[in-house]
Image (spheres, rainbow, N blue to C red):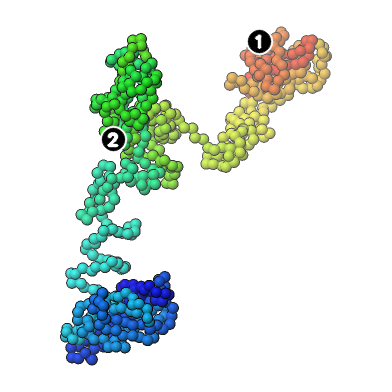
Amino acid sequence: MSKMQTRRRVRPKGWLLTAALVAAVMCLSTTAWSAVPTTVAIEGRLMTAQGGPVADGSYAVTFSLYPKQAAQQATWTETVAKMAVKGGVFQHALGSVKALNPKLLSSGQAWLALRIANEPELSRNMLHSAPFALRAAVADSVACTGCVSLSALKADGDLDLGGNALKSKLISAGSVVAQTVSSAAFSGDGSKLTGIKLPPSTCPKGQAAVGIEQDGKLKCAAGAGGGGTLEQISNNLLTTKFAQPVASKTVPKAIEDNNPIGTFDEITVPDIGPAKNLTVSVQLTNSDITGVELVLYDPQNTKYVLFKGGKGGKSLKETWPETLKPVSGDLSKWVGKNPKGKWRLRVIDAKFLNNGKDGELQAWSINLLASQSKQITSTGVFMAAGGLKHQVSAGPPFACTSDQVGWMYLDSKDKRLYYCDGDWRKLLIEPLCGNKVINPGEQCDDGNIKDGDGCTAKCQKNICGDGVLWTGKEECDDGNVKAGDECTPLCKFSNCLKDWKVNSPCNGKDYGGGCTPNQTGYHFKGVYTQGGVKWGCWWHTKNQAWNTSNQTNFYSLAKQFKLQTGSGGSKWCHAKSKNPCSAGACANSSSSYFSQNQVGAWGWCGGAPFSSGGFVCIKSGNVSACKP
């Protein structure tokens, strides 16, 4: 089908033979020309210069046939005064105005032209096989049993081509069954292709599979960026390339002055795979760099002269071959090879200073850009939607050196994560207590990590016997719920831990300062811990007198707690404070009133004498023996 165009106004600019001559497939008999239909039905489309259909209406159209595309004289012409056009589409039967003689088609070619009114003739279209069926009436002796158009055909079975090929630019089918399908390329992602058996072959090192050959083998090509196709498919977010500087661990090292042997240092490069790039960095000082020569030896003992007095100064810091080219030797030969092994650097100072030491080799390194098959680097944020699993090992999987800093593993014994920072360290992971969210393992979370408010610092609910004092709810909590000690199973103080003889009558004696009933007795302060030992402590305000028979004095306290008593005076004085232990009362005293191993302190402070009082603290072992 072809498109014809003209060069004048907004008249039809071209025409297209759409259903070209589909009605012209006819069978003609050899008995007489009149027995065969003498018209050829055509259908076409008239278009404007902009490509759209011409306006609906009637057009004067002249059709002409030429024996060749460039022939000057038409062999047949007919004019239709009014040809109906709608939507740009027209239909006409050639020969309906002027008879169409089949002999016009005997040359094997016929070109149809179209002219609108007095407009120039539009381009010519070649007629194909269907019109030449007219020739059968004269020369081919074909009996006509009917004239059939394609629109009347209905396929109700398979088309057998008898071993011939079907050729087409486009085949549209629900399914294609064939022994062999050959194609230069497949369109689409191939996600619905089934039954394709991939070959077991692999690609050579450094190449990736890009397709399948006709013989079933993998079609391989060099991967982009030196890292296979991983960089391509991840948009360069993932790579197998690693910048791996291997630095000397035995520098700084003094440089021998005026010594032809020189100063040597060595680096052992581990097995990190083929190098994508290799450079050498050196930093040193010397009184005169022009007398310094740097010689590098690779693991194969190949010699590279990196520097030989190329510039002056007292320091050198360069990277070969990035900032300076070697004097001799080509480091690029290591690209694609594994540089593992010992690399040696020789520093020769050829100028005299003192025949001792002149400067030092401060640092040097072998810098590698390598590709490893067992490691992947993420250049962006790495997110593992399916989870991330660490190496599991019963103890360190390898020694934690500076080369392994950053590695982690899960110890199968204690189920904890360990990380390497030069030494293996346990990663402490605790629940997020204090975030007001009850996480697994937590019983409560009040937004803080303080004890005493009903939710402990470990986000567990306060209960009696947990060893955490619940302020306002518990008087004590000694970590158990046993009876017989200073804290009862209900976290209340024992009946012994209370005020004793408070407001008792004075003994009537005045030992400086006098005594009133509201000043007498022992006021309980609480249980305190010092050095892992618990003490029950009281404060007494006034002299309790010496009368051993008077039950208002300290002998009554000693009796209740089964303390051994004696006679004599106290030589300890402990000031009143918030914590008696901090005042020194929680310690064995040398008071002769109580046995040294039973009471912490006894004494009066200030006044003339014994007028202010003091602390007395008794070990919890004695407190638990109290029988009120």
Evaluate whether residue 409 shows in this view: yes
Residue at image point 32% right, 59% down: 187
Residue 589: give x, y in percent of width and height.
Answer: 65, 12
Which residue is located at x 26 percent, y 55 percent?
Answer: 197
Indicate the amino acid at tag 2: Val
Mark 1 lies on a secondary structure that is loop
Left or right: 462, with 628 as reference point? left
Write down the residue under mark 2.
335
Quadrant of the rendered structure where residue 36 is?
Answer: bottom left
In this view of the protein, can residue 148 be seen by the observer? no
Q: Is residue 26 left or right of residue 585?
A: left
Q: CA distance from mark 1 to mark 2?
A: 85 Å
Q: Earlier in the sequence, mark 1 or mark 2?
A: 2
Per the rendering, the mark at residue 502 is none
Mark 2 crowd level (few <14, some 14–19, many ≥20, 10 Å Cα): some
Q: Nearer the viewer, mark 1 or mark 2?
A: 2
Query: Which residue is at a point 25% across and 25% down the rendered structure image?
Result: 303
Query: Looking at the rendering, in which quadrant would you find the C terminus?
Result: top right
Coordinates of residue 122 in the picture (x, y in percent): 34, 76
Residue 119 lies in quadrant: bottom left
What amino acid type should be assigned to the residue bearing mark 1?
Ser
Residue 622 position in % (x across, y down): 64, 20
Depth check: 292 or 382 in front?
Answer: 292
Q: Residue at x 33, y 43 (%)?
A: 225
- The residue carrying mark 1 is 590
Looking at the image, which is closer to me, 83 or 604?
83
Quarter of the picture containing the N terminus is bottom left
Task: Determine the secondary structure under disc 2.
Answer: loop
Q: Is residue 184 left or right of residue 596?
A: left
